[in-house]
Amino acid sequence: MTAEKKRSLHETSVEQFQRAADLIDLPSNYRSILASPKNEVIVNFPVWLDSGEMKIFTGYRIQHNNILGPFKGGLRFHPDVDLDEVKALAAWMTFKTALVGIPYGGAKGGVTINPTDYSTSEMRRIVRRFTHALGSNIGPETDIPAPDVGTNAQTMDWVMDTYANIAPPAFKQSVKGVVTGKSVECGGSKGREEATGKGVLFSLRHWCGETNNRLDELTVTVQGFGNVGSHFARLAAEAGCKIVGVADHTGTVGNSEGLDIPALISHVKTTGGVKDFSGAQELETEELFSMKADVFVPAALENQVTAERAKTLGAKLVVEAANGPTTPQAEEILAQREVTIVPDILANAGGVIVSYFEWLQNKSSRSWSTKDIETRFREIVWDAHDNVVATCKEFDCSMRDAAYVVALRRITACYDRRGIFP
Ligand code: GLU
């Protein structure tokens, strides 16, 4: 294992905000507060499997900061989930929500599990028992989970239903906002499922405006074809981008004329992955990274753009749809090669923005129209990008550093006024 791989993800997240903190001479008290999560909840809980055996699962909920509002962030179900990863992901949520100016803090949770190893009824029991184990650590005014890798609207419906069933009768209806990303049938918001992918496309649109490029002239490669990658690819193709390469856990496919994304989506629905898609050439994973394209969109897991891959990355722009996809060494190499990175906390904030809309709709027992959501979404996403671009100019820094500066200024302005209790 290389030194790059062994590095703690949480340490990376701390270094990222410290670099921006240096730019604004942030006092050490604030740095110390933000360097560790406020609460770390770890639960070990038993679940009956279909075989009649009982198995213990480990789950996490890491609450990083709540100075600007309730803790907020997804639940990840993946075999690699561990404390270090969830701590980093929780911190990134604090900076993401502050950057886009929505009244939340940051948290993340998860279970160390491969969901594909379990039946639907086992997953339902696992989710319900995990929710029960978290108990009053989550709640519509305290900490609001949402989908992430390996979880979806069905997972959130189960969390909400379990929470409502253990809530006192008077609160059963008012606790729907305990999670966001629910199905529309159960109080979810229109547009939530595609929100992250749509936000990534907005990042690309904004960059085109800043650099005099045209969306319909761009070639794009995408790593990851789950909820975020597939919605992004579909919307980008509709906007005229040529998607020339896509990779997922089953394989890598490419077509220099542009892949037929709706056909690829149906292929993935029936076969479970991009492998063997008939309208494309099969490629090696590494070829996706080195393939010539204007834009590379990592939409899978952390640490995918490594130093090795950065040296030969074929794109001039990286839009981080995933959280933490670029290692610090890779980032240095890309900077030397003048490759621009639109950072994760900006590019993938679309999901939590529509989560916020869902929470507001639940609080007021109302349902917003698609048009209302679209207008408010565009305004928040655009303002955040404008702010980052202006801050890049102010400090002559990268977009990542600028994004952290915007977030840190909001967080610390609030601490300045509230003070530290007692
Ligand atoms: N898991 C998503 C993220 O990383 C969404 C979080 C949310 O909606 O709370 O931003």
Image (cartoon, rainbow, N blue to C red):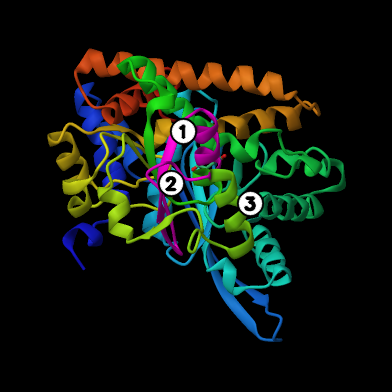
Instruction: Measuring from the top left, give residue 246's x and y in whole percent.
Output: 42, 50
Instruction: Measuring from the top left, give residue 82's x and y in whole percent.
Output: 42, 62
**Sequence-first tag of 3 and 1:** 3
**Which residue lies at the image location 57% right of the left edge and 63% below the top edge?**
272
Identify which residue, 118 or 173, lies in the foreground: 118
Q: Which residue is mark 3?
A: 152
Q: Residue furthest right?
A: 169
Measured Cα–Cα span from mark 3 to mark 2: 16 Å
Instruction: Measuring from the top left, give residue 29's x and y in whole percent.
Output: 29, 32
- Categorize mark 2 by other alpha carbons within 10 Å: few (<14), some (14-19), many (20+): many
Query: Which span of residues is magenta-colored?
Result: 231-260
Measured Cα–Cα span from mark 1 to mark 2: 10 Å
**Sequence-first tag of 3 and 2:** 3
Residue type at mark 2?
Ala
Residue type at mark 3?
Asn
Q: Where's the N terminus, which quadrant?
A: bottom left
Q: Which residue is mark 1?
A: 200
Instruction: Measuring from the top left, give residue 328's x and y in whole percent.
Output: 22, 45
Q: Dot 1: what SS?
A: helix
State the mark number for residue 187: none
Q: Dot 2: what SS?
A: loop
Identify which residue, 105 or 223, lies in the foreground: 223
Cβ of disc 1 within 8 Å of ligand 1?
A: no
State the mark number for residue 299: 2
Q: Dot 3: what SS?
A: loop
**Residue 169 visible to the viewer:** yes
**Sequence-first tag of 1 and 2:** 1
Residue type at mark 1?
Val
**Which residue lies at the image location 34% right of the left edge and 26% below the top edge?**
403
Q: Nearer the viewer, mark 3 or mark 2?
A: 2
